[in-house]
Amino acid sequence: MTKVVVGASSLPAGRNMSSQLDYIKKMQNFGADMYHLDVMDGLFVKNQTVDYTYLEQLKMSSILLFDVHLMVQNPTKVISKYAKAGANILTIHYEAFDDDKKFIKALKKIRKLGMMAGIALDLDTSVESIEPFLKYCDLVLIMSVKAGKGGQQFSESAIKKIKALRKLDSKILIEVDGGIDNISSQKAVKAGADIVVSGSYIYNNEAYEAIQSLKGRN
Ligand code: DX5
Ligand code: ZN
C-alpha cells in the first residue's frame, strides 16, 4: 500500500481565528499529515479567506507541516511574509504570472527562503505548460476543481493530468486538491499522486474515519 500524505484544507474552518485553531488541533489529533492553508485574496479568485497572519498563530499551536496554497493575484509580493510566518511548502499558481522569467524568479525565491516550492495548475491548464518550470519546483499541485471554493465535484480530467505529469517527471511530488473523497483519492494515488487534500469530505464526515480512509486504511 503506497503511503498517501493527507492535507486537511483550512477552508471549512472559515476566517474566524479561534475556529481555525480548534480545527487544526482536530486535524492534527485525527492524523492529518499537513494543514493545507487555502489563501484566497478576492482578486485572483473571488472569495477571500485567510492569510499569513493566521499562519503565524496556527504555527504556534500545531506541529503539522504547513502547505500553503496561494490563490492570490501577485504571489511574489508576499513570498517573504509566508516564509517568516513559517510555511513549509509554498505553492503559487502558474496562471498568476504572465512572464516566465518572473515565474522562475518567484520559484527560486521560495526555495532560497527555505521552503519547498510548489506550482499549482488550475483545472483548465495543461501539464505541458509547466514542463519548462519543473526543475525549479519540488511539487506540483493539480487542481481537480476550479480554484476558488470548496465543496465542488472532483473532475476526472485531473487523473489524465496526474498520469501525464508522472510520465514527464518520475520524482516530482504530485498533490491533488479539490473534491477529494475516499474514491477519488484512490484513483488519484493509483494515477501517481503522492499527496491528497480534502476540505468537505473530512469536514462533512467523522474526521478521523475520513482521514484514515483517505490514507487507504479502511
Ligand atoms: C479550492 C481549494 C481546495 C478545496 C478543497 O480552491 O484550493 O483546497 O477547497 O476543498 P474540497 O475538498 O471541499 O474541494
Ligand atoms: Zn487548495
Image: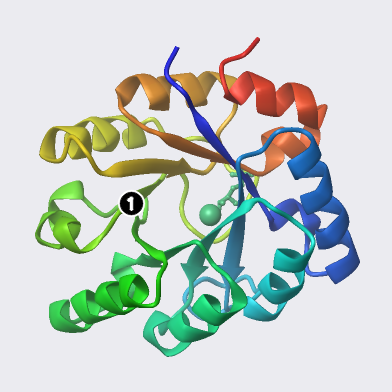
Rendered image quadrant of residue 87: bottom right
Q: Is residue 19 above or below residue 153?
A: below
Q: Which residue is mark 1?
A: 139
Mark 1 lies on a secondary structure that is strand
Q: Nearer the viewer, residue 51 or 2?
A: 2
Residue name at image x 38 percent, y 30 percent: 156
List x then y, in percent, for residue 139: 33, 51
Tell whether 113 sits left or right of 40.
left
Note whether residue 144 is visible: no
Q: Is residue 20 above or below residue 189?
A: below
Residue name at image x 59 percent, y 25 percent: 214
List the single residue furthest toward the bottom.
77
Note whether residue 162 is visible: yes
Tell whether 39 sits left or right of 93.
right
Q: Nearer the viewer, residue 97 or 91?
A: 91
Give, as a three-letter code, the residue at label 1.
Answer: Leu
List x then y, in percent, for residue 64: 65, 50
Q: Quadrant of the N terminus?
A: top left
Tell whether 101 sits left or right of 94.
left
List x then y, in percent, for residue 31: 70, 33
Q: Is residue 55 above or below residue 89?
A: below
Residue name at image x 90 percent, y 65 percent: 18
Disc count in the image?
1
Label 1 Cα crowd, 10 Å radius (few <14 / some 14-19 / many 20+): many
List x then y, in percent, for residue 201: 69, 33
Residue name at image x 88 percent, y 60 percent: 19
Q: Quadrant of the C terminus?
A: top right
